[in-house]
Amino acid sequence: EQIPAELKARPQWVGFKIKGEQKTPCIADAPHRKASSTDLHTWRSFETAAAGLRRGVFDAIAYALDGDFIGVDLDDCFDGDTLEENAAEIVYRCSSYAEKSFSGKGIHILLTGGLGKGRNRGGIEVYGQGRFFICTGNRLPDTPESIQSNPDAVQWLLGDLCTEKAEITE
């Protein structure tokens, strides 16, 4: 229920079957067929994906990033129930919707804007397209309920991840 309305309104959802480390994206109304993060014909409405989750067909649901939002994925950033200092700074500086990941060990942050090529280094991933973002709705306390714009925070993150400038669009 806490998944932002901006995401729910777009037909960019898939189901996920998860067995151990293997995560398989599936078409929400054809769960025997694989979904693609780059093929909009394999995406469905939030309602369709959520219905499959409620019926137990899927273990999780995911949003397909398609240049409309920027996703920040922080892996293994909890020390018990406490958010590690570096991750807490990233959440604070992004000042946007943030939730615990499916594993409960990481954080997903979503921001408005587009991003060309994604970056991945040291347990921090920043993507704008061609990726699925599993959404849990397990929003972090004291973070916005909606997705915010913060190009300065994205540029700061990308500065830590790479030396070249990224092209960020609003």
Image (tube, rainbow, N blue to C red):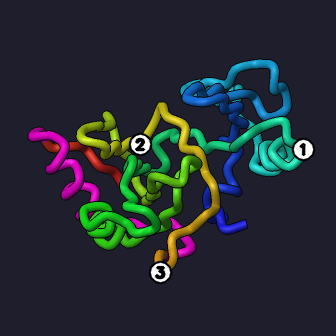
- For label 3, the SS is loop
Residue 150 appears in the picture as rendered: no
Residue 80 place in picture, x, y as percent? 43, 63
Q: Amino acid at mark 2?
A: Gly
Q: Are marks 2 and 1 in contact (CB under 8 Å)?
A: no
Write down the region rendered in magenta. Answer: 144-164
Q: Residues within 10 Å of mark 1 (few under 14, many from 20)?
A: few
For residue 144, side relative to residue 61 (left or right): left
For residue 37, side relative to residue 70 (left or right): right
145 in the magenta segment: yes
Q: Name the residue at 54% across, 54% down.
A: 104
Q: For mark 2, what is the residue? A: 128
Q: For mark 3, what is the residue? A: 142
Residue 25 place in picture, x, y as percent? 65, 28
Q: Are marks 3 and 1 in contact (CB under 8 Å)?
A: no
Q: For mark 1, what is the residue? A: 55
**Quadrant of residue 91 in the image?**
bottom left
Residue 24 place in picture, x, y as percent? 64, 26
Mark 3 vs mark 2: in front: 3
* Mark seen at residue 91: none
Mark 2 vs mark 1: in front: 1
